[in-house]
Image: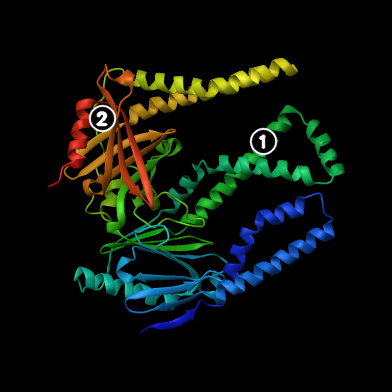
Amino acid sequence: MMTKSAHQPVVAVIAEIIMTVREFFFVVLFLFFGHTRSMTSRLIVIVGLILLAILFGVLRWWFFTYDVTPHEITLKKGVFIRKYVHMPFERIQTITRTQPFYFQPFDVYRVSIETSGKKDDRLVFSALRLTQIEVIEQYRQQSQTKTTESKEVPKADHVYHIQTSELVVFALTSLGSLGIFGALATVISELSMHMPQDLVAKFDHWFSGQTFAGYIMILAVILIVSLVIAFARIYNRYYHFTLTRFGVHLAITQGLLTKKEIQLRLSRIQAVHYEQSLLRRWVNLATINVLLASSGRGDKEKQDKTTIIPVVSSSKAYHVLSDFLPSYRLITPKKAIGIDHAMFYELRYEVLMSLIYLTLPTVIYFGCAYVWHWPTIYSVIGIFILSVLIIYVMICAAVRMTDQRLVIEQETLTLQTSQWLTKHVYTIPRDKIQGAKATQSYFMIKSQTQHLRVIIRNGDGAKMIDMRYLPEAEVERIIRWITHVK
């Protein structure tokens, strides 16, 4: 069975138009909110851009063709510059299908096919029908089964479903609401600059007339809205999350409004990443990710890790994961061998670096305050904010040194560290480690101390994992173990 010079379904034009509109989005904003043109001129230009987006969408769809044979996929695309891509099925590492809500009535999916090669070795189909996707997956399985000389039909070895109660707690403990709060504040500020002046004046009069309790109430409303939006985003993303293992492949399905399915090979996994924020430590929940060797990601998938279990009780996380990654030695690392006063050295370093970074902005501020006679209250607020930042940095440094753990178990290296109060545990097979590096400053020579950096592949780049203030002998032992070849 094979297809010859096939086009994507016509509904792919919608995806191409949306992609083109995104490319013109900032141009549209500039034209709409600019003050150099009348409203009629703005609307004419915007309508012209929309028509141009439709034209480009149709042209991109028409000039995008593909062939599927039992051995490879051949893709031809490009309106002005033609591009030809050949991808043998045995090289395919991951197949990701995404179904936005506007694709669901048509039963089509956006499909991304990746290898472990460079960033350009990735095929993206704006829309494919389920039957077309199944043909590609069937040829992929046949090709890779032939390579491994196994003729068994893949069966579901293990299945994991997320629990709704845990997902709700996971969404409520998300810190994404803080980012949304900042985004809402920015949007409100920008809108106020382009609203009619009489409306802005009325709002300013109403706002300035509020009491302290009124300001607290407004802030609380914005925070609640941010929390609801963050909750809805996470709940929509991980709704009905299911993880399934088929032999040497993992299949992930998730999503409510936007449905997504990922298929990846176990051999592509470089490390297992256990992640637990401060809030989720209190409710005993954790997230399990994997770092993959891939050809890079695009669009909204610009993530540095792939989540295979978004939320699970921290007490049973490794037990659940062992069914899906049986070749990984998943253990809780023991306290890393450190030196005396390592906590003091780390706190001293962070405080000194904070002072170095903050000295110049502080001098500039007080210089401006002196020249322009700014109110003293501004300086008091600034000093308070700087003090809070330094204290926060010191707390993060103390938690990082407290959480720092390390263990070598057979052919596996497990590292635990913290970054901004979020605990990270990496389980790395020795053959997946790309390199290791020891660093030592002048002030560390006397105490015979070194920092250790372990390098592993992540996507199309590298992930650096740092362990700080370890004895030289311990660092040398780890590097010898990493570089040892059986």
The answer to whether residue 215 is above or below residue 258 is above
Query: Which labelled disc corresponds to residue 219?
Result: 1
User: Which residue in the structure is indicated by mark 2?
Assistant: 336
Name the front one of labels 2 and 1.
2
Q: Is residue 154 left or right of residue 128?
A: left
What amino acid is found at the position of numbered circle 1 in the picture?
Leu
What separation in Å lies between label 2 and label 1 (alpha carbons)? 43 Å
Neighbour tally class for label 1: few under 14, some 14-19, many 20 plus, Cα within 10 Å: few
| Residue found farthest to the front | 81
Q: Secondary structure at mark 1?
A: helix
As drawn, 412 above or below 149? above
What x and y, as percent, mark residue 16?
58, 68
Q: Nearer the viewer, residue 77 or 123?
A: 77
The reply to whether residue 177 is visible in this rendering is yes
Query: Where, quadrant-wise, is the N terminus in this rendering?
Result: bottom left
Residue 389, x across and y down, in percent: 53, 25
Q: Quadrant of residue 23?
A: bottom right
* Viewer-side residue, 403 vs 437: 437
Q: Residue at x 28, y 56 (%)?
A: 324
Q: Residues within 10 Å of mark 2 (few under 14, many from 20)?
A: many
Q: Image quadrant of residue 380?
A: top right
Callout 2 secondary element = loop
Residue 96 can be seen, yes or no: no
Contact flag, marks 2 and 1 (Cβ < 8 Å): no
Q: Which mark is residue 170?
A: none
Q: Residue at x 34, y 27 (%)?
A: 402
Position of residue 215 measured from the top left corner of the image (x, y, whole percent): 71, 32
Whichever of callouts 2 and 1 sits on the residue coming sooner in the sequence is 1
